[in-house]
Each structure stands twice: as C-alpha cells, then as structure tokens.
Amino acid sequence: MKMQYHSIRKQVKYASTLLLGIVTFHFSLFISSCTEPESSLVEFVEDNNLDTPNDTVYSLLGIISKMQVIADRTVLLGEVRGDLTSLTGHANLNLQALANFTADAANPYNKPSDYYAIIQNCNYFLATADMNLMKRGVKVFEKEYAVIKAYRAWTYMQLALNYGSVPFYTEPLLTEKDADPELFPKYDIQQMADYFISDLAPYVDTEYPDYGAMASFPSRTFYIPVRVLLGDLCLWAGRYTEAARYYHDYLTKQGSIHPTGINSQGWLDYTFETFMVYGGMYSSTDENITIIPMEEEEFDGTVSYLDDVFESTEDNNYYYQAEASPAYKELSRSQRYTLVYSDPVTLLRDTIEPPADKVYTDENMRGDLRLYFSYTIHSLASGSTNYSSVYQLFEKCHENYVTIYRRQHVYLRYAEALNRAGFPEAAFFVLKYGLCNDHMDKYMSAEERAAAGDLITFSSYTFTTDNTQGIHARGSGEANADKTYIIPALASKSDSILFVEEKICDEMALETAGEGLRFYDLMRIALRRNDPTFLAQKVAGRNGSANFDNSLYNLLTEKSNWYLPLK
C-alpha cells in the first residue's frame, strides 16, 4: 500500500520559501544552481536569520527535500560499480557507463551540484540559526543543529567517495564571487574524515528532534545518528579503536539499545524441503535506522525510480535493468547452510546441511538464503512481445523510501573496526555468534575478552541469546554450530586479521547486496591495504570466475579511475 507524502510536500514548499529561496548562486561550472530558484541570483535580505521555533522543522524538511534528489543515486553509484550487481541488456546507457567506469560529465548520475545544494543549505542553517534562542529553558535549535551537521558531513563524505577530492567550504556562499571554486581547498576522504570527526564529536549525545510520525514514518528515521557517522568517519580515517567505540556505544546506549535481532531466512526442518522467513527483513519499522523518505507521485516532488532498475514494472515493460551478478550467486551458493538436528530415535544432536545431491527448485536456494529471499524471479504470461515474460521482484526496493543505514550495516562495520583494532576473534564473533555475554562466556577466549575490554561490553539484561545472533546466521542457518566456519590456526595475528577481513567482506556482500554499499566497502579495504588490485579483482570478476574482465581489471588498478569526473 502506498504511503502519503502530501504533508511533507506542503511543509517543504514553505521551507523552500523560508530557507532555500533566500540565497541562490552559481558555483562556477559544476556547482551551478545549488538552491532554488535555479537560474537567478537572489538578493540576500537583511532579515535572514532563523530565529523562530517554527524555523526548525521547516528548515530541516527543506534540507530533506534536497536529500531526496540524491537518494536513488546514492544506491546506484555504490551498487552498479561493484561486483554484486550485473546490468541486463535493457539497462539504460547511463547506467552502463557507470558500470563500465566510462561515465562523463554529461551523465545524469554525475551531478555534484546536487550534493553542494545540500551542503549550501546546511551551511546556511548552521551560520544563521540563532543558537541562543531559548524556549522553556531549552535551546530551540540545538537538536536540529546536530542533525544538520550530520547531514553536511554525510554529504561531503559521499562527494569524496565518488569524486576523490572536492572543493571544501563550511560557510554559506552568498555571491558568485564567493563561489569561485579556486578559493577553496580540495579535501579527499581522509581530510574530510579528520575534519568532521572533530566537528561532530561535541554533538554525540545531543538528542534527536521528535516531530512524531511524519509521512507515515517516525521522524527519528530521517536522521543520521551522530555516533554511527563518527564510526564511519573513523573507519575511513584508519582510527579503528575509536570507530569500534562509536559503533559499540551506539548499539548499547542505555535507553536506545540495538541488538542484532534474530530475523533470518532458513529451512524449516531437517528435510530441507520447507523454506521459512523468521521475522521481518529489511523493514522500515524493524531494521532501518536512517531512510530518505520519497514522494508518492512526481506531482508532489522527488520520487524513487529504483524499482524501475531492480524490478519488473509497467514503466519498464517488466524488463528490469539490474540483477544479482554471477559473482554474487557463486559466493552465496558456496556458503554452508547448517542446521542443528536431534535424531528422533537416538535423541543425539548433530549439525547437518542439505545433501550435496539435493535438487533445488531454484539454484539460488543453495547455500546462503539471503539471495533467494532478496531476488524473486518467476514467469509472467504475456500476450505481447513488448513485455518481458520474466518477472523480477527485489525485496530491498521500497518505492516510498531509500535506506541509508540499517542495523546490520552498523554491526558489520563494528566488526570491521574491531578486527583492524587488533581483535579478530571478537570481530568474527559478530559474524558467527553475536556479541552477548552468554555467547562470550562459552566461546570467546579469556585473552581476547580481556584485551578488547569495554569495546565488547554488553549488558547481560538487554543483550541475550533471545535477541542476539551472528550476522551469518541470517542466511546460513545455525552458524554458531558450524565447526567449519572458524578462524583457522595461522602463522601470525596479522594473518588472522586479514583472514577475518575477507570473511567480513564476504558477509557484507551476503547481507547488503543491492543496497548501494558494495563499491565503497571494496574501496575502503583496498585503500587500507594500499592495494588497488583488491577492488579491481572483485569488480572485474563480477560476471563470474569463468568470465573475468581483464580490461576492466587493468582500468581499476589505477585508483584515479575509481572516481567520477568532477568537471
């Protein structure tokens, strides 16, 4: 059932008048028309401060309306350039250019001005909001101030990841002269991270504003948690202990805990004939942390077209443009699904898996089941050759919102940070068991637990075996009982860290495929290892082990080819 967004449309219309229409400018060639109206330079008025309580919600909604413009692009730039998605023969030429790393300045997915539109309006709010304004002893703008700082940092992070090095400024630009790109330094992801870690740290405990339900969603889902964003920034900066601490504290903060949950896809019993989904998956009310709400109709504003890319719709005559790649299918099918089974006669318990000769109705049911749950393919009777007879649905595609953060994203990055901080056993625990005291008491070495200390401290009352599981168990059965899913004996701790990082990378693929994270995950690991071939090998192998793309591999061994052209 479609959700209604008319209330947001009306509020954003006012917000655009209040905030976005105050200043308009051109930022040289590539940052043109960053605010409305698009082609005029509006006189900066004297009475321009944001100094009434009503300004808070309207200003915030105005910025969210700008976030909607980049929502689909955020997913597509991170997904079609990775190794988990293949484009079909019906993909548009612009998507194909992204996937082939040949996108030029004219490509509609390459519009840095849309990101700078968000940044300009964040800068304007942060510069003009009256932070001394009090109401009933509370600073009126404090909560929104923290939220908008997070939006700005996240948007700059997207720019750096997609363009490599970009003009950086933190004050609103009021004239064309001010907006000369040559006036500003260029920051890469390391410089962005270092700046915004310091910028956001004072707001780590600032509460979210609460506007109740908006556009059928709790307003809290519109915000980027500062702790999570700080964890991401520290991860990109190589400050792994700090990253692990931010993620841990977000997950365990008293009054707002986030256990993994026990949602999964699995076989119902030892016959491996009946498939079952346990709990909701990828849902806005359960697993989502941050979303960008989208409009229902074009008349109301910006709508999402991700369904036309990943699904069969009437608009695309059921010819979807993207599907699970052969590399993703190979990885998924290579996983060992395990089930703990009690023999009805002997009552002895054993860990079993589907027999090697089992015949599946769909080969995507082999191994990890998240692929099968995410992509549904079936035949469609068609009376016309204009329509495809193959119909695809994608579980992670939501027409009324785009997901930015899910709970599982945080756990996987937490594991990544723990591992690089020197705690591979604790990191692997996130995948196999889930971090709670009951699991750690049974399976974690005393040495690792003592060394990691409060980075892996979880309340026994709020994190239990009833609400905590390993992320691998979401699709591969009872991973905690799988005696083959282990860290083998290796020559050194460094070797263990590299082994666990590979497992985390695989788990990121299994859990987040199709969500727009993959290219950046590969980029982060490649940069950390100072090894461009890590990314190049994965992306060039997206069509499967038998169809390696040597030309693409050679292209991507040069880091400069990872980024979109800025001009």
Image (cartoon, rainbow, N blue to C red):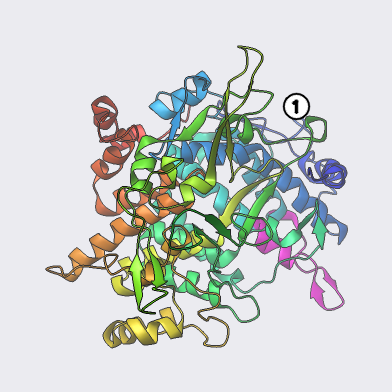
In the picture provided, is 491 more to the left or to the right than 442? Answer: left
Name the residue beneath numbered marker 1: 40
- The residue at 61%/26% (across/down) is 380
The image shows residue 424 at horizontal and vertical percentages of: 29, 70
In the picture provided, is 376 more to the left or to the right than 10? Answer: left
Question: For residue 176: magenta?
Answer: no
Pick the quarter of the image with the N terminus.
top right
The image shows residue 524 at horizontal and vertical percentages of: 36, 51
- The residue at 40%/70% (across/down) is 340
Between 370 and 428, the residue placed more toward the observer is 370
Question: For residue 142: magenta?
Answer: yes
In the picture provided, is 10 more to the left or to the right than 552? Answer: right
Res 386 → quadrant:
top right
Q: Which residues are magenta?
A: 127-148
Q: Is residue 451 above or below residue 287?
A: below
Q: Residue furthest top?
A: 385
Between 144 and 120, the residue placed more toward the observer is 144
SS at badge 1 = loop
In the picture provided, is 340 more to the left or to the right than 372? Answer: left
Between 167 and 274, the residue placed more toward the observer is 274
The image shows residue 85 at horizontal and vertical percentages of: 44, 36
Amino acid under label 1? Ser
Tell me, yes or no, if residue 382 can be seen here. Answer: yes
Tell me, yes or no, if residue 432 can be seen here. Answer: no
Q: Is residue 97 above or below residue 144?
A: above
The count of marks equals 1
Q: Residues within 10 Å of mark 1 (few under 14, many from 20)?
A: few
Res 9 → quadrant:
top right
Between 482 and 259, the residue placed more toward the observer is 482
- The residue at 34%/69% (across/down) is 351
The image shows residue 119 at horizontal and vertical percentages of: 62, 45
- The residue at 39%/79% (across/down) is 347
